[in-house]
Amino acid sequence: RQAQLQSESSRDYLTPLSAIRMIYTMKYQQGSGVLWKGCFSSLILTATETISNNFIDEIAPLDNPLLRIKHILLKAISSFLLIPMYSVHLLRSVQSDLTIVNHWSPLTIFIEPFQRILGIKTGFYARALPLWYLISLSLPYFVGRHALQYFLNCRILKVREETILSKDQPMNINKNQFETVDDIECQLIDTIPNLVDRSFLRIETNILSVFLSNFLLYPYETVLNRLFVQGTRTIVDDLDKAGVGCTAINTRYLGLFDCCRTIFETEGRWGRGFFKGIGFLILKFGLIYASAQCLKLLIERLAIIYTQNTSELSKFHHYVISKQQQEPQDFASETS
């Protein structure tokens, strides 16, 4: 987000490699704490948004065609209440640690938005755009991102389910197909990867849908973040100097269209300024997806080991072998 806000920066950070280099440099210059800026406000905002989304899904599921309008209206109301909190979280997550003097309280994310709405801190936000205007611009973004995420989730899930079904072959277990218990157990172990894939299917789909929705709406998010920060006297790390110094946000956009026009005219060809810092977004979801894949492989290996050691078929197999070994001894004793 710091890369999004710095309109005068000469670096765009469009690739994950450039993002990794900047993260390493800032960590070396300012310590590991620079990577945790805004974590508490992010937890509060994420928890509140998750609770509201679950509540909306219980009242009006989006997959029900008759309740979709109600779902969108409820999502708009919840977004209307969360956008002021998002504005505070944005400021806390981009402000440079080199300039922070006052200790931040978790209650700030609830108190400061209402102070700005009521005009209590008007002098502090002298050049800031009215919060009601910013809320009107942000509502289409948050509601549209939610709807786009649901649409992409359904499409990706359908494609992935068809792919998994094409890999699954019907198992016709009969006496001619399996001669021993070992064959049945091997067939059971072979089905574990598909079972794990089905279990992680929704997790992978959610990750991809969230990433694509954020990626497609990234230019609009850049404009919104710049309008939110304008006039708040926020000082961020100077990314042109590898995070060593600080720079102030001194933009004077008149509104949404003026911000878009300025980005087109002053920040590179083909509107590259709209995608400043997108390498960090790709890196973030790449790490999340890689972590999910590693967890899936770990669970798959543990499931295979558990099945081999504790399956009922394995116990039955050892029982049959022990019985076969005892039968000749019993027959010999009876004969004698």
Image (cartoon, helix red, strand yellow):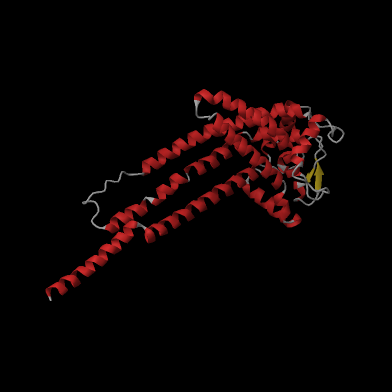
Q: Which quarter of the figure is the C terminus placed in? A: bottom left
In terms of depth relative to the viewer, which is nearer, 128 or 276? 128
Task: Give left or right: position of 177 versus 29.
Answer: left
Q: How far across and how far down the image is residue 27, in percent?
A: 71, 55
Residue 279 placement: quadrant: top right
In terms of depth relative to the viewer, which is nearer, 105 or 123? 105
- The residue under the point 32% across, 44% down is 169
Q: How far across and how far down the image is residue 290, in percent?
A: 54, 50
In the rendered image, the residue lying farthest to the bottom is 336
Residue 273 showing in the rendered view: yes
322 over 285 or under it: above or below: below
- The residue under the point 64% across, 41% down is 47
Residue 147 placement: quadrant: top right
- The residue under the point 78% across, 33% down is 114
Task: Give left or right: position of 302 versus 235.
Answer: left
31 over 92 or under it: above or below: below
